[in-house]
Image (cartoon, helix red, strand yellow):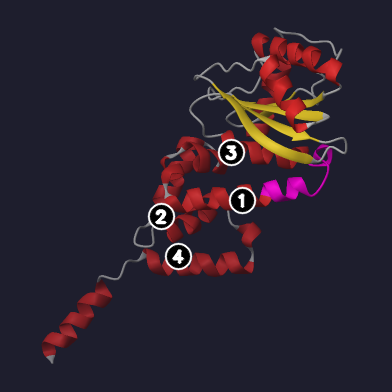
Amino acid sequence: MESDTHSQHTLKKEKPLYLGHRQRLKERFLKAPQALPDYELLELFLGLLYPRKDTKPFAKKLLELHRSLWGVFFRSELFSHWGIVCFHELFRRILIREIRQAPVLNNIDKVIDYAYLSMGHLPKEEFRIFFLNKKYELIQEETLQTGTLDEVALYPRTLMGRCLELNVSNIVLIHNHPSGDPYPSKADIELTRALEAALLPFQVRILDHIIIGKYAAFSFREEGYLGNSPISLHNTSEHQEKAAAREE
């Protein structure tokens, strides 16, 4: 009897202190989710992935290393965890279904979010195309080319042939920069202009060319880099200011 009592006492004594903290954190979250700072929200989420681990120091370390929740989920060792992969895939499917339900021009923000989920973590550059009909509705999304760490080629003939096969009227070009900087290179700009010229006789318009970086995205359409808009290939100061603002 005395031995049993001692065992129960030992078990109670060895109960991890973080379990009580996690329960209190959960209760705070349920009352006011928006009130939790980033590290506590991340700590609570990590508790679902690692139920037997004190996740508070882990959450703080990840945020310190990767600077934002986005960086934690896309640039850290967490990305290989099956729970995170499942979360990404669920969110990706939700976004693509929402994109299909309305004209893409009304959903550019969701297109960018979708591109982040699909391409933000890739180690090599990829070119993906959203093929759209006359009403700007998504017909199909495809990866047409995979390149290297800092380069990907998309040949006008390849893109033109696919547009004709699908009988599309509009497209959105999307590619990623694994280096992290979404600002277009001279080659990116020249390629976009070449693709515009190649597609023009076939009455296919490039609605946007989106480049996905580490913490920001660059839209050719929003920045006036499509059609006859003036372009400065070398002045990056304005872009750097915008990227810094997004990171904050």
Q: Earlier in the sequence, mark 4 or mark 3?
A: 4
Residue 100 covered by magenta stretch: yes
Task: Give SS at disc 4.
Answer: helix
Kindly report the distance in space between the C-alpha atoms of the residues bearing marks 3 and 1.
Answer: 10 Å
Q: Quadrant of the N terminus?
A: bottom left
Q: Are marks 2 and 4 in contact (CB under 8 Å)?
A: yes
What residue type is disc 2 on?
A: Thr
Q: Earlier in the sequence, mark 3 or mark 1?
A: 1
Q: Give the percent coordinates (x, y) of residue 178.
A: 53, 25
Does any portion of residue 218 appear in the rendered image? no
Question: Residue tagged by mark 3?
Answer: 118
Task: Give SS at disc 2.
Answer: helix
- Residue for point 45% across, 65% down: 22
Prevalent SS, magenta region: helix
Q: Earlier in the sequence, mark 2 or mark 4?
A: 4
Question: Residue tagged by mark 2?
Answer: 55
Question: Residue tagged by mark 1?
Answer: 91
Kindly report the distance in space between the C-alpha atoms of the residues bearing marks 4 and 3.
Answer: 32 Å
What residue type is disc 1 on?
A: Phe
Kindly report the distance in space between the C-alpha atoms of the residues bearing marks 2 and 4.
Answer: 9 Å
User: Which disc number belongs to residue 22?
Assistant: 4
